[in-house]
Amino acid sequence: MKVLALNGSPRMKASSTYHMLTPILEGMEAAGAETELIHVRKLDLEACIGCYTCWVRTPGECIHKDKDSMVGAMESYNTADLVIFGTPLYHFSMSGIMKTFIDRTLPRYEPWLVPHASAPNMTGHPERYHYPKKTLLVSPCGFPEFENFEALVHTFKFMAEMENIEYVGEILRPAAEALSRRSLQGLFTSYYDTLRQAGEEIIRENSISEKTQAELRKDLFPGGKQAFYDMAGAYWEQQMDRFKEVQRNKTSQNIMT
Ligand SMILES: Cc1cc2nc3c(=O)[nH]c(=O)nc-3n(C[C@H](O)[C@H](O)[C@H](O)COP(=O)(O)O)c2cc1C
């Protein structure tokens, strides 16, 4: 099975999304999958301008095709059996670059309006290529509640249904900002092991077992919400203090020169 993981975090390797995707892909490889990871930001994508050139003038080809790296990414996208959409939660939805990527998949469709292939009473467009067949959503967020992901999950589920793609499920991680910190990686080894397990199960069973799902939903930090607020507050305060110190040093250097 060919798996394509899209990392939609603008922070690329320094991101919680990347730190979630990596063990999932390791687990998938252990189960025999062939995997590829694309950092969406590296594609330097132009936004879709809605010109429909890809439908009318050059069917299947985007007007931006020579300006960025979407053509190569689309080849991977069109031929993957499973696409993992990895995106941080931004304002209760996906990151801007992930949305830009998805908008740029428009050349996959033909302009005609037809009754939807599988959703009764809905309308669709014929597809030029029917790949990928399955999709998985992976997303971290800053707030500590799973409810924050409601709109995002709905979006990806609905999109999969409308695009005739099987929605395999989602792996969501609230209170995830700390996953992006290199110095804290040692705290999360057991969480990463569970992500590896989930990756293996998806390839072997096409789903994540209830046991693994329950493990994945466990809090990363003990002590409940207030303890989490205090810890996060202390972190941001420390960051601001560091910045103030840099500013102070710059000012005193300026005075001395
Ligand atoms: C522009 C922006 C919007 C965000 N919006 C939300 C949000 O709506 N809910 C939330 O819980 N976290 C939000 N966050 C926090 C990120 O989801 C969180 O820090 C996540 O771990 C970042 O993932 P990354 O390291 O993979 O980029 C936002 C962060 C940014 C930069």
Image (cartoon, grey):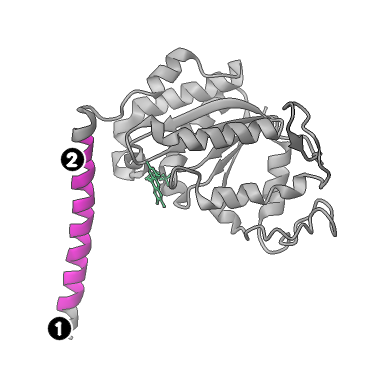
Which quarter of the figure is the N terminus placed in? top right
Task: Quadrant for residue 67, please give it.
Answer: bottom right
- Principal SS element in the magenta part? helix
**Residue 212 located left or right of residue 133:** left
- The spot of residue 65 in percent (x, y) is 73, 59
Q: 10 Å neighbourhood of mark 1: few (<14), some, or many (≥20)?
A: few
At label 1, the amino acid type is Ile
- Asked whether disc 2 touches disc 1, contact meaning CB atoms under 8 Å apart, the reply is no
Question: Does the magenta run of residues contain 244?
Answer: yes
- The spot of residue 235 in percent (x, y) is 22, 47
- Name the residue furthest front: 121
Residue placed most toward the observer, 23 or 59? 59
| Whether the residue under disc 2 has CB within 8 Å of ligand 1 | no
The reply to whether residue 107 is in sight is yes
Judging by the rendered image, the residue that carries numbered circle 2 is: 230
Q: 10 Å neighbourhood of mark 2: few (<14), some, or many (≥20)?
A: few
Residue placed most toward the observer, 50 or 174? 50
Question: Does the magenta run of residues contain 242?
Answer: yes
Residue 255's disc is 1
Relative to 205, say whether 187 is above or below.
Answer: below
- The spot of residue 57 in percent (x, y) is 85, 60
Task: Quadrant for residue 185, please give it.
Answer: top left
Residue 107's disc is none
At label 2, the amino acid type is Asp
Q: Which residue lies at the image location 47% right of the left edge and 52% below the top edge?
A: 10
Q: Which residue lies at the image location 38% right of the left edge and 24% below the top edge?
A: 217
**Residue 2 located left or right of residue 62:** left
